[in-house]
Amino acid sequence: MPFKQIKGGLCAPKGFRAAAISAGIKDAKGTRDDLTIIASDLPCISAGTFTTNKVKAAPVRITQAHLRAKDLRAIIANSGNANACTGVRGINDARAMADATAKALGLTRREVGVCSTGVIGLPLPIDRITDKIAPLCETLSAKNGEAVAKAIMTSDTTKKEIAITVDLDGQKVRIGACAKGAGMICPSMATMLCFVTTDANLSKTCLQKNVLDTVEDSFNRICIDGDMSTNDTVLVLSNGAAGGPRIARGSKACRQFRDALQHVLLELAKAIVRDGERVTKFVTLEVKGAPTYLDAKKVAEAVSKSALVKASWNGGDPNWGRVIHAVGYSRARIREELIDISYNGKPACEGGLVAKTDLHELRAIADEKEFTITIDLHLGRADYTIYTSDISPEYIDFNRSEYAYWKNARS
């Protein structure tokens, strides 16, 4: 199914506007944009997925409650502070962000989603935020999609956004999206922050089913460091501005939208891995021949989270022994003597034993910035793919010093 990439990011679909402003959230003297809003000129239907971490940030709890009660029409988001583990004050601050946004836009509180990202355990400088929301809303424009993508960045080194057009059973529609994420990336319901807009005229059930399916096949398939955030959120707003008949769940157009949304989310998911905190390798990890889907998933996740495996990738070491040992403790059903492991199609392990491939060939592959490892269990037809990375000494240094809690607590 062809997708045409276009400019505009979140504001590419009809009827969506955005804005960003500096509120000095992490640093009162800071000037970078760290507060942003996305709003639709028309009523929307909405859907989302959230972290399954039992420690959930206040904005996650508030936005989940709003989605259960009503469809969202706007999203207010900040970087620099996660508003997580902040107790009753955190809940009240998230509500204050929603209230101020709703007042400025003429909406109800429950039509506003709230998202935060940054350091855990510090209270928001809420007065600095709420004072900026009214002027922020006054600058809403259909030209500010890129500004949103930049304002939600934390340890990211580059913005992550995409927009496409697609024909849904003859009706031209647009999908725009942006995401942030570089650390605390581990598959589970949603990973990082991602906002999606579309002018497709979708039914509620079509949107909800497609969001769940596509998140499972995109953001739930990436792993950088094996850590799941307290703030992970994916929100999708659909305002129907493209016109045409309402797209029902199960229809051809609904399936076409699913394919288009999958393309958008997977592109953003891969961009997150490539921009992982101080990573040097992008690894596609394929598991084949598993007896069940769950077995394939267990193997893929065990290998992708292994610090030993990731360290070998960082060193350009095709150490299949570390891979197979992770397969062995994955709790999946396996038979050691059947396992094959290859690097870009070159056998490293055959039947659980070292293959005859020249080691220099394998080392050359492991030295590349991107490569594919395939693990074939030869026990069935189930498969699973994860996009993952190495782990570097610089990653350790960044997280023990540059991004340390004590430094941020002084702000």
Image: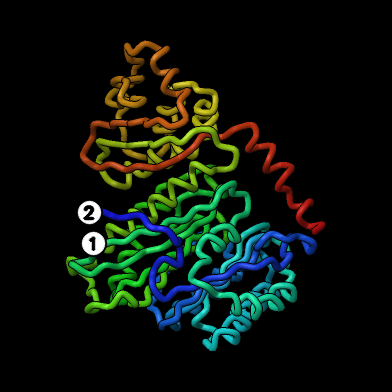
Residue 23 location (% of width, % of height) = 71, 68
Q: Which residue is drawn at 69% across and 75% down?
A: 132
Say which amino acid is labelled 2.
Answer: Met
The image quarter containing residue 36 is bottom right
Q: Is residue 67 visible?
A: yes
Number of marks in picture: 2
Q: Residue at x 67, y 43 (%)?
A: 399
Q: Can residue 215 be seen in this view?
A: no
Residue 16 location (% of width, % of height) = 45, 73
**Relative vertical location of residue 203 with respect to residue 258 in this rendering, above or below:** below
Residue 24 location (% of width, % of height) = 74, 65
Q: Is residue 235 left or right of residue 410?
A: left
Image quadrant containing the C terminus: bottom right
Mark number, residue 130: none
Q: Is residue 243 left or right of residue 93?
A: left
Q: Which residue is drawn at 52% across and 49% down?
A: 185
The image quarter containing residue 1 is bottom left
Q: Which of marks 1 and 2 is in front?
A: 2
Q: Which residue is drawn at 37% across and 77% down?
A: 239
Question: For mark 2, does the 10 Å Cα neighbourhood hold few (<14), some (14 to 19), or many (20 or more) residues?
Answer: few
Question: For mark 1, does the 10 Å Cα neighbourhood hold few (<14), some (14 to 19), or many (20 or more) residues?
Answer: some
Q: In this view, does 115 lie to the left or right of 14?
A: right
Instruction: Please give the residue where the numbered disc 2 appears in the rendered image.
Output: 1
Instruction: Please give the residue where the numbered disc 1 appears in the rendered image.
Output: 256
In what element is the residue under mark 2?
A: loop
**Relative vertical location of residue 181 with respect to residue 173 in this rendering, above or below:** above
Counting residues from the N terminus, which is met first, the one under dot 1 or under dot 2?
Answer: 2
In what element is the residue under mark 1?
A: helix
- Evaluate if marks 1 and 2 touch, with contact meaning CB atoms under 8 Å apart: yes
